[in-house]
Amino acid sequence: MEKQKNAVGRRKEAVTRVFISKGDGKITVNDKDYKTYFPLAYLQNQVEAPLKTVEATGKFDIVVNAQGGGLKGQAEAIKLGISRALIEVNAELRPALKAAGYLKRDPRSVERKKFGHKKARKSYQFSKR
């Protein structure tokens, strides 16, 4: 691999661009270390998950630009982006990542508000008499 590869990950409103290159395992999100950006352990595990699956934890430097959504949406978008970028680097990793379910774009997002309702499904109180 002569230069960096990139991929896009999306989840809810979050969009992340992931740049991967050979290195010593540094993961940076919006110019911060990912452990400072994601203070919760389970979000850090989401980011590390694809690398642990293919046993590439200390082999790549990853730089991420994350926009929109909340922390959880961004973490899951990064997971998808890293998985896609790893496949660009080495196509033989695809079966392992696919079996773990890291190549699926999660389609769930917030349902829109309907008119005549308080929220997407919640109605105003109805009194028959």
Image (cartoon, helix red, strand yellow):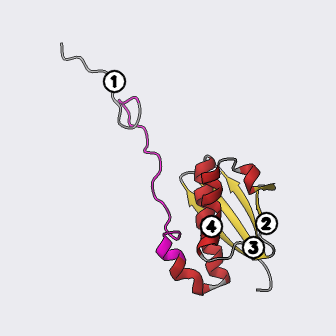
Mark 4 vs mark 2, foreground winner is 2
- Segment colored magenta: 97-118
Q: Amino acid at mark 2?
A: Lys
Mark 1 vs mark 3, foreground winner is 3
Q: Quadrant of the N terminus?
A: bottom right
Q: What numbered label is drawn on residue 58?
A: 3
User: Left or right: 126 with respect to 91?
Assistant: left
Q: Quadrant of the C terminus?
A: top left
Query: Which residue is under mark 2?
Result: 26
**For residue 9, above or below residue 124:** below
Q: Amino acid at mark 3?
A: Gly
Percent x, y for residue 79? 60, 64
The residues bearing labels 3 and 4 have C-alpha atoms spaced at a distance of 18 Å
* Residue furthest out toward the left: 129
Q: Does the residue at mark 2 contact the one at mark 3 (Cβ under 8 Å)?
A: no
The residues bearing labels 1 and 4 have C-alpha atoms spaced at a distance of 41 Å
The residues bearing labels 2 and 3 have C-alpha atoms spaced at a distance of 8 Å
Corner quadrant of residue 28: bottom right
- The magenta stretch spans residue 4: no
- Residue shown at the point (76%, 50%) measured from the top left: 36
Mark 2 vs mark 1, foreground winner is 2
- Residue shown at the point (35%, 32%) measured from the top left: 122
SS at mark 2 in the image: loop
Q: Does the residue at mark 3 contact the one at mark 4 (Cβ under 8 Å)?
A: no
Q: How many marks?
A: 4
Query: Which residue is under mark 4?
Result: 81
- The magenta stretch spans residue 114: yes
Query: Which residue is under mark 1?
Result: 124
SS at mark 3 in the image: loop
SS at mark 1 in the image: loop
Q: Amino acid at mark 1?
A: Tyr
